[in-house]
Image (cartoon, grey):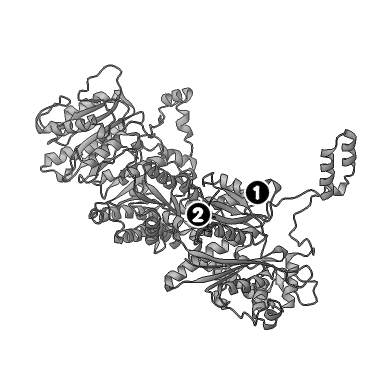
Amino acid sequence: MPDTTTSAPNLQDAVIVGGNRIPFARAGSRYLGASNQDMFTAALDGLVARYGLQGEQLGEVVAGAVLKHSRDFNLVRESVLGSALSPTTPAFDLQQACATGLEAFITVANKIRLGQIDSAIAGGVDTVSDAPIAISDRLRSALLQASYAKTLGQRAKALATVRPKDLAPANPRTDEPRTGLSMGEHQAITTAKWEISREDQDLIAYNSHHNLARAYNNGFFDDLVTPFRGLSRDQNLREDTSLEKLASLSPAFGKSLSTPATMTAGNSTALTDGASTVLVANREWAKKRNLTPLARFVDAQTAAVDYVHGREGLLMAPVHAVPRLLERNGLTLQDFDFYEIHEAFAATVLTTLAAWEDDEYCRTELNLPQALGAIDRERLNVTGSSLAAGHPFAATGARILAGVAKLLHERAASTGKPARALVSVCAAGGLGAVAIVESA
Amino acid sequence: MPQDRYTSFVKSGFGKKLAKKLGLPQPVQLRRHTPGAPPVTGPVLVLSAGAGNAAGTGGTGSAASDADAVAGLLLNGLGSDETIDVRRSPHTAEGTRWGAVIVVTTQAEHPRDLSDAMLALGGTLRALASSGRVVFVSRDAADASSPAQAAVRQGVVSAMRSVAKELRNGATANALVLRDDATVTGTPALAALRFLLSAKSAFVDGQPVTISSDTGHVPQDWEKPLAGKVAVVTGAAQGIGASIAATLARDGARVVAVDVPAAGESLSKVANKISGTALQLDITSPDAGKRIIDHAVERHGGIDIVIHNAGITRDKLLANMDNARWDSVIDVNISAQLAMNEQFLASDRFRDAPRIVSLASTSGIAGNRGQTNYGASKGGVIGMVAASARALAEHGGTINAVAPGFIETAMTTKIPLATREVARRLNALQQGGQPVDVAETIAFLASPATGGINGEVVRVCGQNMVGA
């Protein structure tokens, strides 16, 4: 028996050293026929090629997909085995709806901070073009009963319960199981409650497209994106979109509400396919491989809200997570150089910001002494976000993290001072994950 | 790899007979390098031509000494522990197939001095092995001290070209041309002999390779001459560029594979196959050279070799040419190289015997209908290389161009069938070259052994009838 107990290890820095993703494609288009595994493997191989990680045994690869076939129970491990990484690299799947990618990053960053691993890839992938289509519950139940039947008679009896309508396939759904409402309809309720205007939403969308296009044209994505299946830029990007064009679109959500419907296909994210990765390590690992740390993981927070009983909007969980994160780190909402707020809908960003600016809401709902206040909009999603790039659910987190890490590094290099970013991702189920990263 | 069906056909029993009857070209499968293969496949005959000397007798005095020295190099395995069967007499047992014949003419003073050696060479040609080699070793006519000496030196190169055209079965003839104070026993001559004798020079035919100094050092391992070097290859995502990247990696270099962002998918596959790094960048951006240096230095600790392979064609008759076609070809094929070279040469990280090899083109040299823009750019490469040699030499470095002829790539498969068939047969080897043939020549010029080859153009064209 030992005489002493073991002591806890000192925390190490977890730093982002780079990332890679494939361009995001519109659903049912360029990546039709590509599986989650194909796409995530391609994203991994692009990362390996960029950073010369061929044959490397990494600490762990953690990622996930929201829409997933049952056969993909080991999606990430299978992707690693098909990649240029060492086959002795462990991996696991993780899932937290649209926050999957960010949660995967938080998970590996924490492991690295604790010294459990020295390096990792976090990421995510999703395809709606290769989504699983299931059989109906009644048919499934009959087939299962028949498979357990001991006699021919029992088997016949089980199968006899099947009715023609049971043979229709069950399409994948992203509606909230507890409310039956789509995410757009949920957001429409929140949008109306906060009286967010159509013009403000269209401006968010306009900025997203133009910021993303500018970043592409400046070569910002040269070392963040590797083409896939002939696509070299995000297919959803509309470089030439205008406020007039956006204003001409018909509303898509909230049409049954008593207030005017303001959410259109232009200011809501399109269904997209894609995969993304972010490379995280401790400083020693990065140094040994001559890789430059871009940004350091500071802290993260998740939250959940009661949207089922209508107390809070479905996508408002980050509103609650951020003040807890700020308080723990002694920061104010204004202490950031960059804000990356995932654009599930333009209105999601706007309701989030409106809530933080509202004194009464902050006092009653967030238990704060006063409003967190406004942010400098010039610092918001400066290289575009999901409205322009698209939002393959689980792939959004690593897209944001790799991009913002590069932004922080560039900013710190040009000013000679540290730079800081706030990352916020809302998710189905009333979930939200937020994180702080600083230039490394 | 694109198929040359004709070559396969004339190798078959019926195809062979038919081609012979009709007098059609009968290309053979060229011998190509496999790691560990010896430089030559059979005995090597060393002949000498010099004042008052009978060829093949070993001779006496200074005239024979260069030939003796070459024979000595061969006996020493050309700088390795390989065993080479070296002969000085063309008389040999019936059925012997010569792996190579080397004709040393460095000490010839007058055109008359060539006759014995040339006739002795002629006697061996029917007994030359398939993919055998004839290598002349001569001196540059420009250095000659008398008209007669200049005449014999110039004559050797032209005779070599005619020999090359007479050879069959994939055999080639080339010449080492020594200039200034370069010697036959210098490291560059040694390396050039190894290259020209080996299967690595499969598609180099009828070419003089000029050596202007003995600068260079013998690599520790001829299988890994680029060990410890960092090499950048532009346009590496496919075709010749991918082959260059793979060949430099095989020779021990750590490779930075560069291509435009849009080619990133295949670029990452190339990089992963050779454990290099992929760098997506547009070489026409003003800071391309700096970004390449930063990447190479940061990730690999230095930058030693740059291969300017990226190139485009935008063919149009000049009468129909537009600004976009003209300018894009000039920008990518030559302006970008000029700008990047300035940045490389200004960097204190590009100082340790640096190497630059740039892709020219035989059609660029000879001119080609519809390719005024391309010709201007590729001719530009040759001018740039010649004018940059001095700057590179200051750091013990070199800059050279490689001019491919018809190479079997995805690009040449787009040429209409009839034109392609003609283009591919219009050379002494009666076939197109492979991307690896270009890559091997580039690896040869990038090696630490070839410091004495600087400002030159080496064609990899199977002795193409155009552009001589």
Element under disc 2: loop
Q: Measured from the top left, where is residue A99 in percent x and y?
A: 64, 62
Residue A118 tag number: 2
Q: Nearer the viewer, residue B396 or B98?
A: B396
Instruction: Tell how many labels.
Output: 2
On the image, numbered disc 1 is attached to which residue?
A: A33
Residue at image coords 54%, 44%: A87
Of the residues shown, which amino acid type is indicated by label 1?
Gly
Picture layout, residue B66 above or below residue B396 = above
Going from the N terminus, do you reach mark 2 or mark 1 first?
A: 1
Within-10-Å neighbours for mark 2: few <14, some 14–19, many 20+? many
Q: Nearer the viewer, residue B10 or B95?
A: B95
Q: Nearer the viewer, residue A248 or B74?
A: B74
Is residue B212 left or right of A416 when viewed as pictured? left
Picture layout, residue A215 above or below residue A172 = below
Where residue B434 sits, quadrant-wise, is top left
Q: Measured from the top left, where is residue A390 in percent x and y?
A: 62, 62
Residue at image coords 78%, 65%: A181
Where residue B125 sits, quadrant-wise, is top left
Chain for disc number 1: A
Q: Measured from the top left, where is residue A91 in percent x and y?
A: 59, 49
